[in-house]
Image (cartoon, coloured by chain):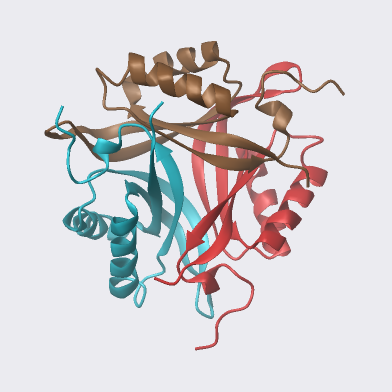
Chain colours: A red, B cyan, C brown
Amino acid sequence: MKTASLILLTIIAEDELESRLLVDLKSLGVRGYTICSVRGEGHHGLRASQWEGENIKIEVIVDGVLAETISEHVARSYFPHFAIILYFLPVQVLREEKFTKHEEHP
Amino acid sequence: MKTASLILLTIIAEDELESRLLVDLKSLGVRGYTICSVRGEGHHGLRASQWEGENIKIEVIVDGVLAETISEHVARSYFPHFAIILYFLPVQVLREEKFTKHEEHP
Amino acid sequence: MKTASLILLTIIAEDELESRLLVDLKSLGVRGYTICSVRGEGHHGLRASQWEGENIKIEVIVDGVLAETISEHVARSYFPHFAIILYFLPVQVLREEKFTKHEEHP
């Protein structure tokens, strides 16, 4: 099968940030996402359990340039104020045209 | 720890396809799976938001040959009609014998 | 963006083991986690469907040393008695100091 190398980027945040994050992701060029409700516990600076309870895990598949853009935006706009986690890893995907900005013209 | 290199293959689909996908995966040789309910939004061709709402994320751990077989089957049987997403990435697993076809004989 | 290479380690287990696993993970040095409820089906030895039904997926981000420590602990303490799955893969994370033992001192 022909696959494309893209980036699976994951954001974990408190659920109150969901609509704001989705608006941001779409305006940056994300074309699809999945959200899973998760529970969790994390550390924020020297305080324990800054976020504990209902959180969301947002996953998007993007190219390397968009992954970098999202990372910079989240770091700048959210990290100073919120206990957001962001990580990414390479994935092989089928139907690359679903994730990149320009549709293939059949 | 002794680990084995296998493939974590993820399928995201509308929840109505769950039982059909599971039957297919098992008949292809998958020995275990997890399903998580997710919400999401995606693009299907030129129409926006073809799938939006309740979806499922199916994850299986398989060897490279089975990953290829599953990819080909999903592409052939589902891609023409459904907005399914499929991606995979390498993982290191413990207890390889749980994921491959032939049990180790202790 | 400056990222750090860490390990995303995933444990899938029956939900009754949640509190016990979390106590263990924290005592081993894990500083945060997310838990997602999943359904699933798997194989345990020669018996089919040893775990089927409500399970949990615990995800932690740790360094390579801690990933090895967790793997050894889970293998020794849980594998003989429970149908636990453990796998891991490399990820790039922002804000490394949230996941490693020693906070950065700003």
Residue B81 located left or right of residue B53: left
- Residue A31 figure quarter: bottom right
Q: Position of residue A45 (x, y in %)?
A: 76, 22
Q: Nearer the viewer, residue C17 or C104?
A: C104
- Residue C95 figure quarter: top right
Q: Position of residue C25 (x, y in %)?
A: 50, 17
Residue at screen point 67% across, 62% down: A26
Where the N terminus of chain A falls, by quadrant? bottom left
For residue B62, say whether it is visible.
yes
Residue C94 located left or right of residue A58: right
Picture layout, residue C12 above or below residue C102: below
Residue at screen point 25% across, 35% down: C53
Q: Nearer the viewer, residue A14 or B87?
A: B87
Q: Position of residue B88 (x, y in %)?
A: 44, 55
Residue at screen point 41% across, 26% down: B1
Residue at screen point 54% across, 80% down: B46
Residue A88 located left or right of residue B41: right
